[in-house]
Image (cartoon, rainbow, N blue to C red):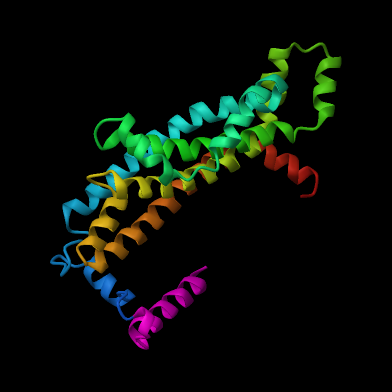
Amino acid sequence: MVFGIAVWLFAYWLLCEGLSLPRFEKIPGPVTILSDWISANPQQGTSIYTPDYYQHIYVSCRRILIAFVLATALGVPLGLLMGWSAKVKDYTFPLFETLRPIPIMAWVPLAILMFAGYETPVIFLATLASFFATTLNTMLGVQSIDESYFRAAGCLGSRKRDVFWHVVVPGAMPFIFTGLQISIGVAWFSLVAAEMVSGDFGLGYLILSSYVNSVTVPMVIGMLTLGFVGWFSSAIVRFVGNRLMQWHVKALAMQGR
């Protein structure tokens, strides 16, 4: 992992600062970025010592947390019902599949018209993108459950409610947490796109405002910060999933997988 990162940084330095190739001459290199990033007096206005930098991170993280919680609270139950009940799927899946391919940027004008202020449209757009990923993976998780589990539960006299809680929900868990990892990544890039259009703070706003003001170093700092924060949030979801899914890991180990 360390070697891979080192190779990437060397290639980045070589293209932008070492060889100064024509297509990369306007892009700030790693030495320029790092020196400004850790400087108490950054030349282009953004570093770890400027309060606005942490304000942008905090606002984006708060929006992601709200959007992710909303998408999970809405998407997981809907996905479970769509995967378990053919009638629910017949009513909801056609509309779901019609809306899902629409790009988030296409929703931006409607979001601005529907919601007042800067905050709510951005959260709505991030929630919407995350919701589709969560719901679809949850539904696929239910559909992947072996039919023999349902037959066994029926033979033991289980009621529908018991089958749902003791077969459907645990059986779909691996897909649910895989979907949540995808979902939080989708939420991040949707959030940044929304902040570029409708926002006053946030990492997306920082990237766009830096580009508009022709200060490229804060733009790249915002991109790298977004990558680190997004990776950390995905790692948290993965950690929680692994803790709750220890029974699944043991089951795979017993199968030799």
Name the magenta segment's main secondary structure.
Answer: helix
Q: Is residue 43 left or right of residue 17?
A: left
Q: Is 159 placed left or right of 112 in the picture?
A: right
Residue 136 can be seen in this image: yes
Residue farthest along the bottom direction in this orientation: 19
Q: Where is residue 98 in the image (x, y as percent from the top left)?
A: 58, 36
Residue 8 drawn in magenta = yes
**Image height of 217 relative to 161, above or below:** below
Nearer-the-camera pick, 202 or 234 = 202
Above-or-below relation of 84 to 217: above
Q: What stretch is highlighted in magenta?
A: 1-24
Q: Which residue is drawn at 31% across and 58% down?
A: 222
Q: Which residue is drawn at 19% across and 67% down?
A: 39
Q: For the point 22% across and 47% down, which residue is it?
A: 55
- The quarter of the displayed image where residue 135 is located: top right
Residue 126 percent across, percent down from the top left: 41, 40
